[in-house]
């Protein structure tokens, strides 16, 4: 729990503690990752509609200057560099930075991909540095107003930030998140799935914020995989949720249930609040 000052804001010591928790957690993941999560060439080739939607929002990458916040193992950063973008990849975790550097070297994109250890809440870049900012499951680890202000500052006028994040209004998903944090220790206690109130905060600094929700009925796949793992005693990795969501574990079922979700959400838009994932584009 964060310690609050008399003004109701987290103290500097609490913020340092939050960032240290995040750094240590992701350093540990990086050390045990084996070097990559997936093939960078195929990182957007998964069957999930949320990844395809995010890719379509990014637009043309050739010749664009792109910042990847919370780059993790570097698979997305390398993908962008392979598509002709000039990529700056940052992560709070020193271990993740090393993994991204190694992956860039392996794929021969070191001249187009610059990696630095950096806090996304205090970006060390000049104003209006980037055409595009990308973040995959990163914003929910951050202080939203601080990160928002930095993203807006570093984008050129008309630039975009495309963010793909967990959505935090589904009580069953939140119950799992509690168990994953407290029991399985595969989530940090400092992260929080985004709410619509968080997204409203983004609208205070961006000219336009467009959102699309995903993963409704397809949440059944998460429940199935989780209970199967518990019953069989299989270890859950920090990446398992993403592997299910992207369709890497159950590709056919993901395709079918994603189509069901699309029909339900078009017919009953109010169900979007029950979704577990959201993709949005912020235009400066």
Image (spheres, rainbow, N blue to C red):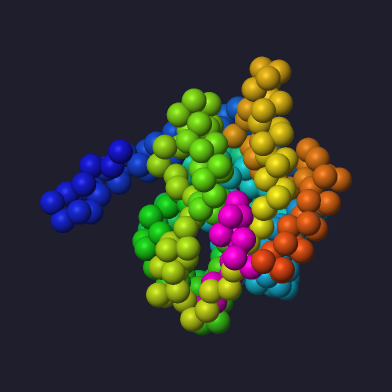
Residue drawn where x is 49% and y is 25% of the image: 183
Inspect this view and state whether residue 195 appears: yes
Query: Where residue 141 sits in the image (x, y, percent)?
Result: 46, 48
Does 63 sit above or below residue 81? Answer: below
Residue beneath the point at 81% across and 40% down? 250
- Looking at this rendering, what residue extends furthest in the right direction? 252
Query: Against 148, is 217 above or below?
Result: above
Residue plotted at (56% across, 42% down): 172
Q: Is residue 101 magenta?
A: no
Relative depth, front residue between 138 and 94: 138
Q: Please check the rendered image and state whether residue 281 is part of the magenta-colored stretch, yes or no.
A: yes
What span is colored magenta in the figure?
A: 269-284
Residue 89 shows up from this direction: no
Residue 52 placement: quadrant? bottom right
The image position of residue 237, as x and y in percent, is 63, 30
Residue found farthest to the top: 233
């Amino acid at each position: 729990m964060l310690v609050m000052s008399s003004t109701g804001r987290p103290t500097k010591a609490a913020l340092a503690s939050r960032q240290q928790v995040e750094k240590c957690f992701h350093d540990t993941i990086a050390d045990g990752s084996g070097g990559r999560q997936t093939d960078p060439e195929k990182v957007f080739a998964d069957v999930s509609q949320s990844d395809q939607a995010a890719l379509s929002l990014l637009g043309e990458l050739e010749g664009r200057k792109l910042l990847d916040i919370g780059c993790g193992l570097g698979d997305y950063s390398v993908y962008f560099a392979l598509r002709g973008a000039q990529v700056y990849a940052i992560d709070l975790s020193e271990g993740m930075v090393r993994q991204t550097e190694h992956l860039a070297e392996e794929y021969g994109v070191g001249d187009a991909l610059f990696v630095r250890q950096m806090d996304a809440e205090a970006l060390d870049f000049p104003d209006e540095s980037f055409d595009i900012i990308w973040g995959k499951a990163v914003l929910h680890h951050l202080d939203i107003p601080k990160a928002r202000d930095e993203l807006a500052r570093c984008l050129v006028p008309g630039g975009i930030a495309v963010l793909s994040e967990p959505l935090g209004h589904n009580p069953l998903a939140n119950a799992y998140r509690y168990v994953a944090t407290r029991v399985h220790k595969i989530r940090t206690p400092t992260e929080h799935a985004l709410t619509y109130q968080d997204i409203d905060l983004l609208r205070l600094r961006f000219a336009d914020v467009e959102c699309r929700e995903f993963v409704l009925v397809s949440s059944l796949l998460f429940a199935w995989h989780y209970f199967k793992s518990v019953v069989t005693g299989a270890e859950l990795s920090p990446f398992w949720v993403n592997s299910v969501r992207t369709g890497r574990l159950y590709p056919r079922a993901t395709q079918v249930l994603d189509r069901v979700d699309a029909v339900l959400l078009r017919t009953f838009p109010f169900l979007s609040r029950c979704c577990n994932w959201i993709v949005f584009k912020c235009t400066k």
